[in-house]
C-alpha cells in the first residue's frame, strides 16, 4: 500500500479550532442561561445548552478523526474529549454539566477510531463514541444518551485496456460520509505498474479529472505496464478527514 503524506499539523489546527468553537458555543449558552436565571422554568435554557454541548462533542470527534487519519494516532480522540469535558466543567454557571464518553472498542475500532485502507477497492476512516450527558439547572434536570458516528469512506474501481506494454486505465472513485455522498477537498491518484514497484503519481489536470458533483470522480490515463496495474486514490474530504483505497485493474 502506498504511503500517505502526514498532515498532523493541519489536524492539530482543526482540534484547536474545534475547541475555540466549543468555548464560543458554551459562552453563548451560559449567557442565555444567565439571562433566564430568574425564570422558574429553565427548560428553554437547558435545551439550548444541551444543543450547544452536543454540537461541541460532534466538532471534537470530527477534528480528532481528521487528526488521527492524518497520522495523529488513535489516542487523540480520548485526549480531545478529556479536554472538552474539562472545558464544560470549568464553564458551568449556575447549573451542572456531566459528560461521560465511551469510545467504541471492537475488532476494527481502537479507542473509538477505525482506519481501514485496504487493497480491495474500499477504504474507511471512522470514529464512534457513545455519550451520556446530564445537565441540571435550579428547576430542571436533563439526561440524554446518544452516539456520534463520523465516517468517511472511499470506493475505488479501475479497469484497463491495451497491449502487454501500454495500457489505458479508467479509474472511478466515490467518497461517502455518514450522511451519504461527500465531496473531496483534494485528491491524489497513483498507480503501480509492477509488483512491489514504485508508486507513480498521475497528473490529474492533464488527464482530465471529471467531478460529477455528487462525490463521484473519474479519470483516464495511460500507463506502461508489463503486469497487473494497481491504482491508489487518496482523498481528504471537506472536513480534512483522510481516506485511501487501492484497486486492481
Image (cartoon, rainbow, N blue to C red):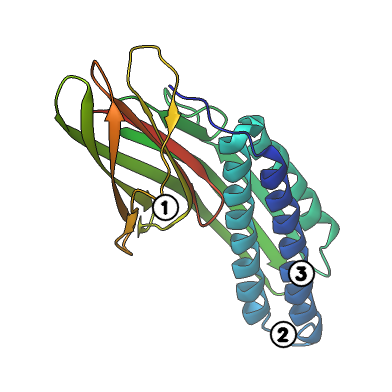
Report which residue position mark 3 lands on: 24
Question: Is residue 129 or residue 199 the one in the foreground?
Answer: 199
Q: CA distance from mark 1 to mark 3?
A: 41 Å
Name the N-terminal-most of marks 1 and 3: 3
Between the residue at mark 2 and the residue at mark 1, the CA separation in whole angstroms equals: 63 Å
Q: In the image shown, does 15 or 170 lie closer to the viewer?
A: 170
Say whether residue 223 is left or right of residue 19.
left
Few, some or many residues within 10 Å of mark 1 (<14, 14–19, 20+): few
* Residue beneath disc 1: 205
Q: Secondary structure at mark 3?
A: helix
Q: Secondary structure at mark 1?
A: loop
Q: Residue at x 63, y 29 (%)?
A: 73
Classify 66 as above or below 238: above
Q: CA distance from mark 2 to mark 3?
A: 26 Å
1 and 3 marks in contact (CB < 8 Å): no
Identify the residue under disc 2.
40
> Local crowd at mark 3 within 10 Å, few (<14), some, or many (≥20)?
some
How many labels sit on residues? Answer: 3
- The mark closer to the camera, 1 or 3, is 1
* Residue 230 vertical placement versus 141 (above, below): above
Q: Is residue 97 above or below residue 231?
A: below
Of the image marks 2 and 3, the number of the one nearer the N terminus? 3
Q: x, y percentage for residue 47?
A: 60, 74
Task: Say which quadrant the C terminus sits in.
Answer: top left
Location of residue 59 (image quadrant): bottom right
Residue at point 33% right, 15% down?
A: 194
Amino acid at each position: 500500500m502506498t504511503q500517505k503524506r502526514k498532515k498532523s499539523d493541519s489536524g492539530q489546527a482543526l482540534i484547536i479550532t474545534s475547541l475555540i468553537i466549543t468555548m464560543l458555543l458554551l459562552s453563548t449558552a451560559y449567557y442565555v442561561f444567565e439571562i433566564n436565571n430568574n425564570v422558574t422554568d429553565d427548560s428553554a435554557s437547558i435545551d439550548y445548552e444541551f444543543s450547544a454541548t452536543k454540537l461541541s462533542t460532534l466538532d471534537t470527534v470530527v477534528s480528532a478523526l481528521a487528526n488521527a487519519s492524518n497520522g495523529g494516532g488513535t489516542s487523540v480522540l480520548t485526549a480531545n474529549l478529556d479536554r472538552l469535558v474539562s472545558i464544560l466543567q470549568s464553564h458551568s454557571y449556575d447549573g451542572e454539566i456531566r459528560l461521560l464518553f465511551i469510545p467504541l472498542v471492537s475488532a476494527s475500532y481502537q479507542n473509538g477510531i477505525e482506519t481501514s485502507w485496504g487493497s480491495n477497492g474500499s477504504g474507511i476512516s471512522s470514529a464512534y463514541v457513545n455519550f451520556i450527558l446530564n445537565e441540571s439547572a435550579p428547576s430542571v434536570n436533563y439526561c440524554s444518551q446518544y452516539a456520534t458516528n463520523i465516517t468517511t469512506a472511499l470506493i475505488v474501481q479501475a479497469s484497463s485496456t491495451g497491449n502487454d506494454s501500454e495500457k489505458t486505465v479508467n479509474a472511478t472513485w466515490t467518497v461517502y460520509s455518514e450522511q451519504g455522498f461527500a465531496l473531496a477537498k483534494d485528491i491524489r491518484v497513483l498507480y503501480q505498474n509492477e509488483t512491489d514497484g514504485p508508486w507513480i503519481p498521475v497528473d490529474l489536470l492533464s488527464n482530465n479529472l471529471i467531478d460529477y458533483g455528487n462525490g463521484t470522480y473519474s479519470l483516464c490515463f495511460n500507463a506502461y505496464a508489463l503486469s497487473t496495474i494497481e491504482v491508489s486514490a487518496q482523498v481528504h474530504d471537506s472536513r480534512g478527514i483522510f481516506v485511501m483505497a487501492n484497486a486492481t485493474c
